[in-house]
Image (tube, coloured by chain):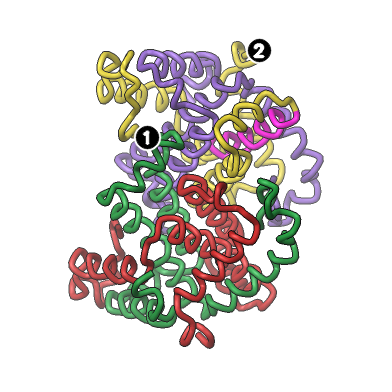
Chain colours: A yellow, B purple, C red, D green
Amino acid sequence: MRTDTHTTVGVLRQAVADFVNDRDWRPFHTPKNLSMSIAIEAAELMERFQWLMPEEARAAVEDSTEQAAIADELADVIIYCLSLSNALDLDISSAVLSKLQTNESRYPADQFRGRFRRPERER
Amino acid sequence: MRTDTHTTVGVLRQAVADFVNDRDWRPFHTPKNLSMSIAIEAAELMERFQWLMPEEARAAVEDSTEQAAIADELADVIIYCLSLSNALDLDISSAVLSKLQTNESRYPADQFRGRFRRPERER
Amino acid sequence: MRTDTHTTVGVLRQAVADFVNDRDWRPFHTPKNLSMSIAIEAAELMERFQWLMPEEARAAVEDSTEQAAIADELADVIIYCLSLSNALDLDISSAVLSKLQTNESRYPADQFRGRFRRPERER
Amino acid sequence: MRTDTHTTVGVLRQAVADFVNDRDWRPFHTPKNLSMSIAIEAAELMERFQWLMPEEARAAVEDSTEQAAIADELADVIIYCLSLSNALDLDISSAVLSKLQTNESRYPADQFRGRFRRPERER
């Protein structure tokens, strides 16, 4: 986790806000466009795994070049998520923690633990 | 930003890791499956804006019920991003900050500022 | 519509089947991988419209180079749809026509016609 | 293939055009919105396979209830593809056949056949 342990979400949001503002890109960063952008980058992330058999996917993620490529695509997804939270003034930390709490009651741990039972509809 | 100003990425990653581990879901949270999950949740987020005209989209995000729904969908995207970073032991903060740096040189601010010029290929 | 008026879905499915078989790609064209591929190509199609304001999107589609690029991306989406129908031996025509029939009763025409009322949840 | 062998793409396009026109939905079916809709439905299709292990995915598609659900989601993707081709007056058959031809030379069959070698960048 290295820097994740001491970097706040707010610091990352500010870095993205500065990047967008420095280029006068706010008019383009509408919520609708950002939701498309998140989906587009998510697809590029998926593309890293598109044709891999499960065992190959496992091997791929051991490879450091491939790891860097995945980190790069994941960063794109997250950057647009941060920009959307900026555009809408949404607090990511509370959204995430409160969603986990909702999911806690929707998927009680004792109904899943030790049962090899997956989230039927995890949302 | 409220809690984002003092919540580290690491704290959110740990909350997601606990949630997944408490249900023995790690075998399902493979990188390939997680990349699909991020894309699926991104699509649900997009769905909030699917048919809206730009001015309507602007009005929608003022509405507090709609804001909560958007926050909820965005949280789902981010939760899977956090789970992927856990599965691959990727440091999100450094990935994001280093990607912004790459983008700094790819899209020099002075070529965009004040020109109403959008990112042709922002990635 | 030119050739669409006399080309059957079956002819297109066969062309895709031949292409896949000629390369021994059937082991990779699993339903799961194909569903990912459809989503990936759909995102590339979206990318053509990612940052455009509505009036710009309208202008873009008048441009013949842009039209060709869109046709190309749409073809990719449809090719994978055809490959999935081949992999699962699904009849596309009946699936489409029967889904339209379901939607007929779900969205009765007289509740929408002339009302500028959009499909709230068109699915 | 049953009805696919004698149903033209034009017939399906017309059925979708009628459905859209009967509800006065053309103003909403802009190319940008339709590209989002294709991606959204593609994600719902993916959701059928989200957490399945490969062997499970294989079993799932044998199940007739699951098959019907997949056919239904695939139909949604294709219906929006047909609507986009209507909105842009694109000929699907020629787009698909010409894309396959491009791919023929990009992925020469003899470099793949019998080699268990997948499309590195199949687009």
Image quadrant in which you'd find residue C44? bottom right
- Give whichever of D34, B115 is nearer the camera: D34
Q: Which mark is residue D69?
A: none
Amino acid bearing label 2: Arg
Residue C88: image location, x then y, percent: 41, 56
| Figure quadrant of the C terminus of chain B | top right
Amino acid bearing label 1: Asp
Q: Chain of mark 2?
A: A
- Give whichever of B121, D17 is nearer the camera: D17
Depicted C65 relative to depicted B94: above or below = below
Q: Main secondary structure of the magenta part?
A: helix
Disc 1: which residue: B72
Q: Residue at x 58, y 29 (%)?
A: A55
Please tell me if label 1 and label 2 are on a single chain.
no
Disc 2: which residue: A2
The residue range painted magenta reads A65-81
- Give whichever of B69, D50 is nearer the camera: D50
Depicted D112 relative to depicted B27: above or below = below
Q: Is residue D8 visible?
A: yes
Q: Residues within 10 Å of mark 1 (few under 14, many from 20)?
A: some
Mark nearer the viewer, 1 or 2: 2
Q: Secondary structure at mark 1?
A: helix
Residue C31: image location, x then y, percent: 46, 49
Q: Secondary structure at mark 2?
A: helix
Residue A63: image location, x then y, percent: 71, 26
Query: How many discs appear?
Result: 2
